[in-house]
């Protein structure tokens, strides 16, 4: 999709700083004109927003809006590369704007030092060509997505946690019925169990990797080249340098919606009863191998979430699959996928944390190869 800008004026020369990208036939002088007249709103100047902002400014995006109500903390500096040591305690919008001015003085940065909420979301997002969601809470994800859908503005969304990331583009104006964020995460109640970087950690280079993909998606939308991630979710695993795409359709991806026929979760107590009752159960850990090695439910097999499609042929259709992760978030998504493939599957409610409460420390599962 190519965004609708004012007809470009004839351009015969471009600034020297952009020559390496304008020499690309897909960009050229006309594409650089689109870049320089584009208005992109970035919500969040944190782990994803920071490297993304630097990339967009360096590319010459004409106007960059920035929404963030937080201040720079020393613990941010390992991954939030738009901020500097002397910015600690300063508003992130001020810190980011100062850095971007040194990256490219020809870019206009519009600061919105406020928290996005139901009262201001529609107003803040109305005047931009592309919106980028670099936040880390589901509440804000839904607000940004709903505002973008209302204005029919393309939304580039990304998420990162530990070593994992996801990126997608939601573009309600591209084709009728184009999927949106609520097709990916339709159940808002699932956000109550979402893990955070503050609790479980994140590698700064993982943030930069995901942000780089997001910045590329912005450039594709602005200039009109390539194939944006519309209807696709790119899953990134920095531990294995693995990239995998998951197709997304309108109303077709229900990552946290329980099956209508039977509950998609099982409590730790019910899990013990199932095993003790002799039912054929295969226990699957969808965390990363390093997490599995550290602590695992005995006799469980480690199949990271992104490896599930390749592992389907090895799973017994006659067995109930009990899937777990750390707290139940990743396993809920995996179970919805397994149910769609015709398997009997349940997510262990509360994950291994809930299981540990009734068990002594245990190690020793097996890792899928």
Image (cartoon, rainbow, N blue to C red):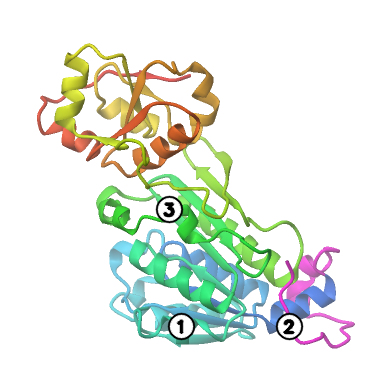
Magenta stretch, overall SS: loop
Q: Left or right? Give the position of 243 relative to 277.
A: right
Sort mark 2 into few (<14), some (14-19) or many (20+) by Cα contacts within 10 Å. Answer: few
Q: Left or right? Give the position of 7 relative to 81.
A: right
Dots 1 and 2: beta carbons under 8 Å?
A: no
To which residue does mark 3 refer? 160
To which residue does mark 1 refer? 122
Q: Earlier in the sequence, mark 3 or mark 2?
A: 2
Q: CA distance from mark 1 to mark 3?
A: 25 Å
Q: CA distance from mark 3 to mark 2?
A: 32 Å
Please check the rendered image and state whether residue 6 is part of the magenta-colored stretch, yes or no. yes
Give the magenta range.
Answer: 1-27
Q: Secondary structure at mark 2?
A: loop
Q: Which mark is residue 5?
A: 2
Residue 349 in which image quadrant: top left
Q: Nearer the viewer, residue 14 or 366?
A: 366
Sort mark 3 into few (<14), some (14-19) or many (20+) by Cα contacts within 10 Å. Answer: many
């Amino acid at each position: 999709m190519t965004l609708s800008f004012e007809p470009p004026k004839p351009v015969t020369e471009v600034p020297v700083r952009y020559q390496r990208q304008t020499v690309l036939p897909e960009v050229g002088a006309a594409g650089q004109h689109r870049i320089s007249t584009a208005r992109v709103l970035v919500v969040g100047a944190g782990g994803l927003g920071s490297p993304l902002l630097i990339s967009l400014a360096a590319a010459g995006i004409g106007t960059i809006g920035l929404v963030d109500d937080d201040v720079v903390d020393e613990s941010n500096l390992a991954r939030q590369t738009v901020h500097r040591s002397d910015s600690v305690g300063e508003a992130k919008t001020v810190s980011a704007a100062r850095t971007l001015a040194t990256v490219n003085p020809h870019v206009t940065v519009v600061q919105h030092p406020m928290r996005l909420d139901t009262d201001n979301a529609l107003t803040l997002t109305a005047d931009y060509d592309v919106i980028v969601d670099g936040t880390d809470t589901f509440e804000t994800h839904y607000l940004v997505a709903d505002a973008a859908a209302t204005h029919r503005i393309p939304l580039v969304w990304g998420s990162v946690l530990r070593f994992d990331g996801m990126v997608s583009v939601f573009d309600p104006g591209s084709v009728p019925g184009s999927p949106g964020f609520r097709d990916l995460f339709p159940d808002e109640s699932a956000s109550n169990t979402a893990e955070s970087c503050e609790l479980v950690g994140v590698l700064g280079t993982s943030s930069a990797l995901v942000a780089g993909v997001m910045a590329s998606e912005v450039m594709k939308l602005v200039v009109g080249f390539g194939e944006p991630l519309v209807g696709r979710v790119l899953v990134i695993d920095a531990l294995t340098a693995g990239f995998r795409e998951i197709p997304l359709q309108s109303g077709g991806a229900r990552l946290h919606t329980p099956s209508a026929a039977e509950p998609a979760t099982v409590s730790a107590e019910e899990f013990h009863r199932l095993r003790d009752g002799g039912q054929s159960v295969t226990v699957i850990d969808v965390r990363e191998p390093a997490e599995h090695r550290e602590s695992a439910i005995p006799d469980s097999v480690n199949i990271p979430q992104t490896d599930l499609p390749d592992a389907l042929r090895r799973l017994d259709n006659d067995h109930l699959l009990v899937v777990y992760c750390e707290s139940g978030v990743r396993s809920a998504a995996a179970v919805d996928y397994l149910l769609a493939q015709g398997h009997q599957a349940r997510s262990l409610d509360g994950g291994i944390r809930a299981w540990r409460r009734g068990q002594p420390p245990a190690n020793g599962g097996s890792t899928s190869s």
